[in-house]
Image (cartoon, grey):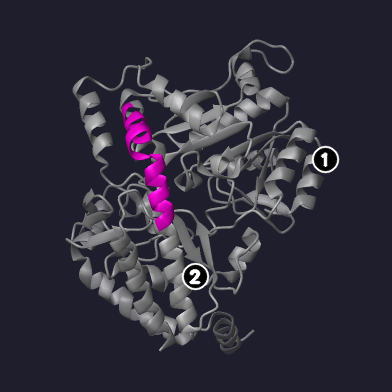
Amino acid sequence: MTDGRCDRDLRRRTGVDPRRVEQLRRREDERFRELHPRCAALSGAAERSMPRGVPMSWMTDSFDHPPVWVESGHGAHFTCADGVRFLDTNIGDKSTFCGLDPEPVVRAVQRRLADGWQFMQPLEDAIPVAEELARRWRRPFWQFTLSATQANVEAVRLARLATGRDKVLLFFGNYAGHADELLVSYSGGELRPHTLGLASRAFGAAGIVPFNDLDALTGALATGEYACVVTEPALTNVGVVLPEPGFHDDLRRQTREAGTLLVLDETHTLICGPAGLVGRWGLEPDIVTMGKAIGGGVPLGAYGMTEEVAEVHLRERGPDGSPGELATGGTLFANGLSMAAARAALTEVLTEEAYGRTAGLGARLADGLESLFGDAGLDWPVHRLYARSGWSLGGRLPRNAAEADHDAWPELSALQHTYLADRGVWEAISSAGPAVSVAASAADVDDYLAVVGDLVAELTA
């Protein structure tokens, strides 16, 4: 297909001229460089001691413009080294849903720091944290890690011990953390590493099927090979892909019949309600995992389990009866800082009122986007996920990752994020979409909509 035909197809599908996107992107990239000389200098200096000049190499891959170096953050805004103030609608990839400096968490952390925070022994704060998580997610027993990745790793190990099976079943587009068996993709008729540096043998321990495809799920589970299915309640790393009616009921029924544990990862979706989507939708996982926002942004992961699964956790016997202990834990897990932060976040920040208010702001955001696109004559459907929104360019809301990938337009996403950043709005990651934090206001939502409105006007002029 010629470039001209590609351009015509894009314009017909999205209502936007690719030549206009290219023109605007050149302008906005130059504006970004002009706004951020200090950030550019810091990146240059950092190249002497860090690969790619950043603490984590993905910081240069996941954004559509050079990284900004942050100096401070308060409420729903942060300021970079060049003095540019940003409204944060990425909310730290959901880690700062409590806001950038929630006062109860700051106060609790300061008290803990004054009395020491790392002992490799339990602290009393862990009890109310576990009890509150148990109350919300209706899973009575909990363990703690430092990240959601580690929570998912331990959940998978627990499922293997419970079932005597090795394999993990995933859905295309679901991200469950940076562990070898959780970073798989499918290409050329076989499983492949999703990223570099992964052990090839790990892919024999994984399977992958399309989200919302119950027939494919049935076929995979019929093999009797899978210890667990690991998924988010709704996919959140390919934009948003919502489950079709009846999907979760059938997923739960099929996993039970197959003797396969169901692990639901609420790391991103816990912004949807006091008990995430598990609570909102009445879901019944064997294990629920999470991280990020439950610690108010302080490193923390957790997983909760049913009583039956907890008994396996305590068994200290392998499926063949051999003695041993489950491979869990870490020296810094459940440290005093994490537990103090989580106690404050759960009891004073992530309240019923806060979730009701952020869901209302998310609806205001979605309503505003629908109005903007409708007025401009753009067929860009808007999805709604409580505090989070976003849109699709394909004239439909995707039902799986393949449709989400097909409907994406990376060049337009790159323009969008740079355009917003140049006007003090941080959205950053193309797969994420805007979300509001507990610290956000109606005025912040309106500011976001105003900048998107300006972009739409320029795209359709």
Which residue lies at the image location 66% right of the left edge and 36% below the top edge? 262
Along the line of sight, which residue is nearer the eye, 253 or 332?
Answer: 253
Find out whether the residues at labels 1 and 2 contact each other: C-beta distance under 8 Å.
no
Q: How many other residues sit within 10 Å of disc 1, few (<14), some (14-19) or many (≥20)? A: some
Q: CA distance from mark 1 to mark 2?
A: 38 Å
Label 2 secondary element: helix
Q: Is residue 368 left or right of residue 281?
A: left
Q: In the displayed structure, would residue 460 be above or below residue 455?
A: below
Q: Which mark is residue 294?
A: none
**Residue for badge 2:** 410
Q: Is residue 263 visible?
A: yes
Q: Is residue 249 left or right of residue 450?
A: right
Where is the C terminus found, in terms of image quarters? bottom left
Q: Position of residue 436 (x, y in %)?
A: 38, 55
Q: Is residue 141 magenta?
A: no
Q: How many other residues sit within 10 Å of disc 2, few (<14), some (14-19) or many (≥20)? A: few
Q: Is residue 342 magenta?
A: yes
Q: Position of residue 203 (x, y in %)?
A: 66, 42
Label 1 secondary element: loop
Q: Which residues are magenta?
A: 340-360
Q: Is residue 167 left or right of residue 289?
A: right
Q: Which mark is residue 222?
A: 1
Q: Earlier in the sequence, mark 1 or mark 2?
A: 1
Along the line of sight, which residue is nearer the eye, 377 or 169?
Answer: 377
Which residue lies at the image location 74% right of the left edge and 56% below the top edge? 189
Q: Give the foreground label among 1 and 2.
A: 1
Q: Main secondary structure of the magenta part?
A: helix
Along the line of sight, which residue is nearer the eye, 244 or 15?
Answer: 244
Q: Is residue 413 visible?
A: no
Q: Position of residue 265 (x, y in %)?
A: 55, 40
Q: Quadrant of residue 3?
A: bottom right
Q: In the displayed structure, would residue 128 be above or below residue 211?
A: above
